[in-house]
Amino acid sequence: MKTAFEKFNFKSLGELKEKIKELNLDIPVSEDVSSLKCDAKIGDRALKNLLCVHPMEGCDSKEDGSPSDLVYRRYERFAKGGSGLLWVEACAVNEGGRANPRQLYIHEGNVDEFKNLVEFTRSKAEGEVYLVLQLTHAGRYAKPGKGLPAVIAGENEYLDRFLPQNVHTITDDELSDLENQFVNAALLAQRAGFDAVDIKSCHRYLCNELLASYNRKGKYGGSFENRTRFLFNIVKKVKEKADIDVTVRLNAFDEIPYPHGFGVDKSDYKIPDLTETKKIVSTLYELGVKLINITGGNPYYNPHVNRPYDVGFYTPVSHPLENVRKLLNAARQIKKAVPDMRVIATGLTWLREYSANVAAGCINDGWFDFVGFGRQAFAYPDFANDIVNSGGMQRGKCCIACGKCTEIMRDGGTTGCVIRDSKLYLPIYTEGRQGKQKITGTRVGESI
């Protein structure tokens, strides 16, 4: 059964400040959000504000991985919403790396379809917009269909119980070949007109899993040099062969016990240890990466870490504000360690309309350079316009942290906001929940 936790019930910014003080958290808050509409730069590219849409997968591509009408609809909404940066959702670099049979997948046969999406998105934006394509291999969370297996870097006693029966442990030779497939996808993204590619290294997909492959044998496991080899090799090769910016969405910490989790204290996995994270970001900067997008946790295993919620399938031991602070502080610490790196923070959606006030407070205090929104963008695609033009966000348009967009994905449907975009997504959600009820005998809303 779903369980309610600490529901967001702040009636004013003052009440939020009092709760932050009560919990003894150093979260900056600003009454004035005008700093978020400042111009900024990534390299030579000017951005119209400091607001970003995080990569939000819709699970709604065509069978061959090309953008569908729903993909076009999503990026039209995002483009019109006013953010200076759109981080286009996870796009597989090969068929076997797709997280579901409807995940975007770029290849030689559909690069022109992606070019059309880029041109369409730019045409719907007011002014310049910086477009990043997130390149991925889903690893242990791969469900591409067609009899293809999930792929793991090694065994994990905490995560393996979620694996399907069809699993393959990737070899060193296969990883070496996969590096080149990432490079090829980056070249295709360049042809399509994207400004940058993201080598996705978060949320325990394959590249993130390799960062925690302490117990893996061979050249991709064990030492820091080996565990980072895959990521650094891809970045080096893309920089050598493509004329496109390279960035990374990086898990600062996994919050999974060591030695199965990356970026965690060895004695208490709930405490981030960012020593290696900072080292990775510093090396990435030396390799020519000028923008990093910081996140944490695993939405399949511990979703409260990177998606603090009001209602979920378990009650976290920590208050949602503590998880908000943990994510924001990770970005802060990385910015402090590598000050020339442009850092994007996450973790603000649970704060509803006060997200903008906390974001501005952090920006004003130099914690990071940009702020991104994920679930919030599904629910409230024009949040940037309201911040820039109206001086804040409207609670009645905000994400309510109910998790239904994630439930649709788990049910195998195409996803979006069930609450704020209900005409399209409420029927999909209802059908999926009823299907689970028939299969498992559970009531709609129960954990399965």
Image: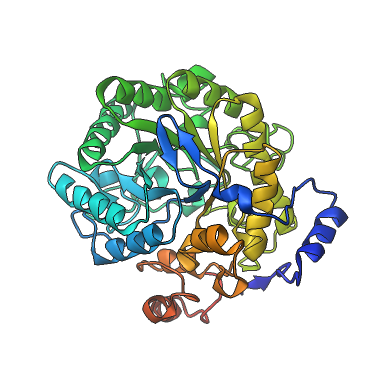
Up the image or down, 301 lies above or below 231; here it is below
Nearer to us in this view, 98 or 48 = 48
Nearer to us in this view, 57 or 147 = 57
Q: In this view, does 283 lie to the left or right of 415?
A: right
Nearer to us in this view, 51 or 214 = 51
Image position, residue 310 (x, y; %): 66, 68
Image position, residue 280 (x, y; %): 53, 25
- Point 31% across, 28% down: residue: 179
Tally the numbered discs.
0
- Point 26% across, 59% down: residue: 61
Q: Which residue lies furthest to the left in this view?
A: 109
- Point 53% across, 26% down: residue: 281
Image position, residue 379 (x, y; %): 49, 68
Q: Can residue 261 be seen in this view?
A: yes
Q: Is residue 375 left or right of residue 415?
A: right
- Image quadrant for the N terminus? bottom right
Up the image or down, 309 lies above or below 240; here it is below
- Quadrant of the image occupied by residue 4: bottom right
Q: Is residue 144 visible?
A: no
- Quadrant of the image occupied by residue 229: top left
Image position, residue 43 (x, y; %): 43, 29
